[in-house]
Image: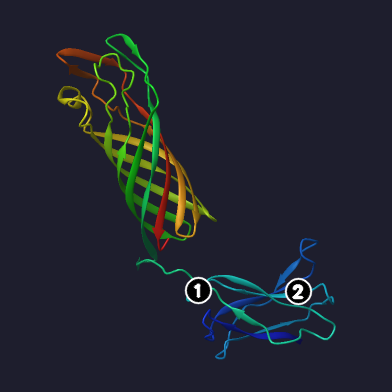
Amino acid sequence: MDTLVTGTVTGPTGELLAGASYVCIVDHGTAGFEMRRTELPSGATDGDGRFHCVTELALRANVTRILIELRPGRPFQSTIALVCTWQAGGCAGTPVIVANRAPPEGPGWLGLRGSVGLWGGTTGGLLGNVNANTVAQSFEPHLGYHIGVFGQLRTGGLALRLGAGYVNAGALFLGATYLTNDAFDVSVLAFPLDLRVRLGPLDLFAGPEVQLSRSPGAGEDFAAALEAWVLHGGGGASLRLGHFFSEIRYILGLTGTTQERFVVGAVPVVLAGTHRSHMLRLSVGWAWWD
């Protein structure tokens, strides 16, 4: 068994990393053409931070490449580095691999990692059509904004995230014939609970959301017609770029926004069906420790 190459693993400030788990990879093809990689038995750097790659495989001069992959673990994250291209006389020099520092982790408990963050953006949507006193009601699209915070617990590729935010839904009832003034904004306090699955830089999520209604511009008579709380369901996707992320979320009302019977200006209103809202939120945010 011939020794191919040895080298040293250091941290970003030059410190030797002893006990760093690594695996040697023999790349049998040129980049992009007939790539065939063989992993040799893994090991850990010695007290001097040195790694050793040995193999009995047939090597081709100027074609076979030797790589080192540092396995994820504190205080570094996964790093793959080209050690050398094999020559007839072996690998010249003593390679040095600089390991990338892993980002700091949030607080942990029973294998779960915690993180917190901020999110905000624009909210658009449409209220579902109903009949009010046998008159068909169709509503115009509305546009608003939202801002909030969240906390999250993660284990591996799964996470549970609870958010709390203020949502201005815009003129939700614009187009209602039973209202003298239909241009008022409706605002809610939203509490989404997401189950999230991580696929590389992409998070897919789904879950319920409870909204507590507020509408200071609606007038006292119609404000009393709004349900105190509304249950929604929804889902979407989030793209992470370091601590920054962008997100799209679709939300569907599972319960009605208003009561089915209410009074506006001494006029009784009876709905055939319930006001269910459809919302689309586009958000950007920042997460710590995620």
Q: Residues within 10 Å of mark 2 (few under 14, many from 20)?
A: many
Direction from residue 235 to residue 273 in the image, left or right: left
Q: Examine the rendering and report whether any part of residue 211 can be seen.
A: yes
SS for callout 2: strand
Q: Which residue is pictured at 28% across the width and 21% down the height?
A: 182
Estimate the x, y position of residue 121 in percent, counting from the top left: 39, 43
State the scheme by which the image is colored: rainbow
Image depth: mark 1 or mark 2 in front:
1
Left or right of 249 on screen, residue 54:
right
In the picture provided, is 102 more to the left or to the right than 119? right
Q: Residue at x 34, y 26 (%)?
A: 276
The kind of residue on which mark 1 rests is Arg
Q: Is residue 109 visible?
A: no
Q: Residue at x 39, y 47 (%)?
A: 194
Name the foreground residue: 271 vs 111.
Answer: 271
The secondary structure type at the circle numbered 1 is loop
- Look at 21% across and 29% down and name the residue there: 217
Task: Place residue 178 in its image quadrant.
Answer: top left
Q: Quadrant of the C terminus?
A: bottom left
Q: Amino acid at mark 2?
A: Arg
Q: In the rendered view, would you say 112 is above or below 262?
A: below
According to the picture, the residue beneath numbered tag 1 turns out to be 101
Residue occupied by mark 2: 65
Q: Where in the figure is residue 190, as x and y percent of width and height?
A: 30, 41
Q: Nearer the viewer, residue 256 or 277?
A: 277
- Answer above or below: position of 212 versus 286: above
Q: Position of residue 7 (x, y in %)?
A: 65, 85
Disc 1 and disc 2 in contact, CB within 8 angstroms: no
